[in-house]
Structures are given as C-alpha cells and as structure tokens.
Amino acid sequence: MRKEKKKATIAIIGRPNVGKSTLFNRILRKRLAIIGEEEGVTRDRLCASGELFGLAFDLVDTGGWQRDRSLPFSEEVQKQILTAVQEATSIVMVVDGSIGVTREDEWVARALQRTKKPLCLAINKIDSTAQEWLMHHFYSLGISPLIPISALHGNHIVELLQSALHLSPPSSSPVPTPAPSPLKVAVVGRPNVGKSTLVNQILNQERCVVSETAGTTRDAIDVPFFYRHLPFVFIDTAGIRKRKAKGEAVDTFAAMRTTSAIQRAEICLLLIDATTGITSQDKKILHHIEREGRGSILLLNKWDLVKGRRMEHVIRELRTHLSSLDHYPMQCISAKEGKRLGKIFEQIETVSHDFFLRVKTPTLNDCIEEAMRKQSPPMYGGKRLRIYYTTQIGSGPPRFVSFVNRPELMGESYRKYLIRQLRHRYRFAGVPILFFLKGKEGRGKEGGKGFTKKEGGRGPIASPSYDFLLFEESVNRPCES
C-alpha cells in the first residue's frame, strides 16, 4: 500500500494575552478564534487545518497557561493545554516581545522543555525591523530557533511555520480510503444547559471546558469523530442569550460564532433545561434554526434533576401545548450521567435521512392530488387555487415548487394543510420544508404557456415554522433550482 506523510500538528502555547489567538487566525486567514484585550478569552482548545506551500498541517490554539490555579478556569484550561501538547508533533511558544521575558514565560518554557517535544519560540508584537533587537532578551529561555513575528500585521509568519514544520518528525501511514463527508451537528441552546458536557460525554473525554458558570464556552469548537464507522463533526457552541441582555464584546463575538455554526451544520441539537421547560428564548433559537433551514432535534437535558414525572408524559404535554413541535424528535437525557445518549444518534440518522430525502415527481404529484381530493382549496373572490404540477428542486433542506394559476389564492390554512399531508406521507422529521409557488403568466388566462414567480415582495409567510415560502407572480423569470 502506498505511503504518505502524516499531517503535522502544531500547538500554539504561551501565557495569557500574548497573541496566541491572533496568530492562530493569521495563519489560517480566518477569524476562527475570538480575540479580546482582557486575559483568558480562549478557554477550550481550537483545532483547524492549514496549508503552507502544498503541505497540510493541523493547528491548535490553546488558552493562556498560568501557574496560579486559583484563577477562574485555570485547572480546566491547563488540562486542555496538556492534551494539546501531548497530541502535537511540534510546539510554537508565543511570548510578548514588547514586554520582555517574564517569570510566567520562564515557567512555561521550562514546562515545555520537559516534554521533549520539538519547540520553537515566536516573539510576537515585533511590528517593525527597528524592534527586532528586543528578541535578544529571549535567548535566556534556552529555546531555539527564535523568530520575531507580528501576528497582527503578518510579519515573518511563513518563516515561523517553516521552522515549526521542519521540527515535526516525519512519519508515514497508509493512504486512507476516501471517506464520506462528515455530518455536521451543532449543539446549541441557552447558556449553562449542558452543551459542553454533552459533547464530552459523547467523545468520552474532556474535550471542552465545563463549568457551572454560565458562558464558559465562547468559541465554536469543531470536534471530528467516528460513530459506528460514520464520520461526524460535532460543533460545541456558546449559549445564545437574550438580545436585551447587555454583554461584553466577547459575548457578542461568541453569539456570532454560534450563528455561523448553525449555518455550517446540517442538524442542530437544541438542548433545553428539563427543570425549567421550554422558554421563550428556546423558541427563538428554534425559530432561528428553522430560518436557516437546518434540521433540529430537541433534547431535554438534566433529566436526572426531574423527580416524579414520566418522560413520555412531559413530551406529550409539550407537543399538546405547542403544536409547532409535532414533527420534531424529542428525547429526555442526562448529559452529566450519560443516560440515553445512544438514542441521540438514532434520531440524528432519522433527521439526516429526511433532510437529504429526494421525492420522485410522480409520487409527489400523487400526494398533492390526493390531498386536494380530500379537501379542495377555498374560493377567494370567486376564484379557486389550481395546482398543475409539483416537483422537488433541492434537498438539505427539501425544497419544492408548485406551478399554479394564481399564487395569491393560497390561504394560510390550506398551506398548513398541504404541509401536514407532505409530512404524513414522507415524514420529514425535524426538517423545515421550503415550498415555492410559481404563478401562471397572465392573470386570469387558463391557457397561458409561461409561468412567473416573484422574488422579494412579502418573502416568507410569518408562521411558527418557516416551512413554506410564498412567491407571487410578477417578473418573467424562470424558477431557480
């Protein structure tokens, strides 16, 4: 079997507030890590793939390493750092060139030298050649090579990467068989509902920092892994707070990362605190997931704290009081105790199947015709809606277009009725349905050949679930697939 070099893994280590996350973003040319002026912004370790001159590598950002264990999250952050050091093939230690050598730098340097890992020193905040003389103070740390860099301006980043990759020991492994694209699953919810605890339990390792303090997670953490030989990427996200709640800039960027994670994912696991039930904020989060066209599974976490109630009764009550939740899979779990987590993957498989489901056009038209025979559309102004033909134009989520005589004759109640019939026939569990109407060209003409649709206008109809988009006839333009 042909051999190839295994990807290098470069870990970025250093004391707090020396520019590790800025360097991480600069190397990857993406704003993946949240950056702030205060110390301790990064808590989890972030992993991403990069490339230099055709050579691929994995880059790991970590929190600030400090001796004082009494500071918030210091123990948890240190565990993440030690894991990153253990998995790395080479380490880049970052220091602040504008400040000089500190006792914390000396302590970090000694700790890294004891690991016997290949090590190079990045002296950050050297923004011009006139400041390069500052690097001589850092020879006392006993680390070589030393590279003066500016993570903010991008100076000498290539030289740093070349040094780090040169230090990585060459290794080889069999060329892997091409694997299917991993399914991206975002874990979302309000702060402190157990998102990071759930990810750690699924991975059976302390991959994400967990704390009783709300807002512990800030970055969106992508965690690839395999379950029953199938690839997944779980995305641990920051809690989505109420808009009216005033927060720091870091919280604002964390919310932006969460929104981006929802957009990147195919399926979202919405965690709900079982002790409080579904709140208005949970409904807003679900509403946002639907607008983005993602599949959803509702997980009632912290079930170990609920006493005297049966799971099936609670789920039945939720579906009774909130009819918009009928098509969402629900599960009561305890992420802390690891109970009923295996059923999550069964529901992910179901929602994933329906998310990418393609319905054959003949059976789809049979479903619509049968629905119209059971219940005809109501008349408006002496006119009745006629649906000539329906076809699916996309999946992930499923998107349909119907050619009709007059789109404005589609009433809200009949819209909901057709959606229910589609779900009854094809299930579409936890999946929003996007349904477009394409009107016949020339109002009132029954024999016209062309069809038109209008993009803009009213846009989506306001409803509990954004599973139906109505476009009126206007511009002579083909339907986009």
Image (tube, rainbow, N blue to C red):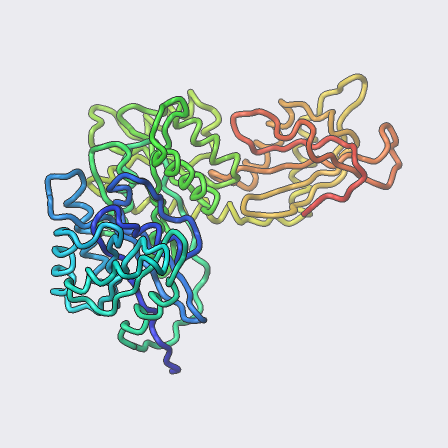
Quadrant where the N terminus is found in the figure? bottom left
Q: Is residue 338 visible?
A: yes
Residue ranking furthest to the front: 130
Is 36 left or right of 406, judged from the image as shown? left
Name the residue rendered at 32%, 41% in the picture.
36
Query: Which of 395/383 is in front?
Result: 395
Where in the figure is residue 382, as x and y percent of width and height? 81, 18
Q: Left of 105 or right of it: where is 19?
A: right
Q: Quadrant of residue 314?
A: top left
Measuring from the top left, give residue 102's x and y in whole percent. 15, 52
**254 or 16, nearer to the observer:** 16
Q: Residue at (42%, 48%) from the top-left corner? A: 31
Is 52 rendered above or below residue 67?
below
| In the image, residue 229 above or below residue 367 | below
Task: Report which quarter residue 370 is drawn in.
Answer: top right
Q: From the viewer's perspective, is residue 209 above or below residue 281? A: below
Q: Which residue: 35% across, 76% down?
A: 5
User: Left or right of 466: which side holds 22?
Assistant: left
x%, y% of residue 253?
Answer: 39, 38
Can residue 201 be seen?
no
* Residue 445, image x, y percentages: 88, 31
Task: Name the residue nearer the viewer: 216 or 346.
Answer: 216
Relative to 306, is 351 on the left or the right?
right
The residue at 24%/48% (across/down) is: 63
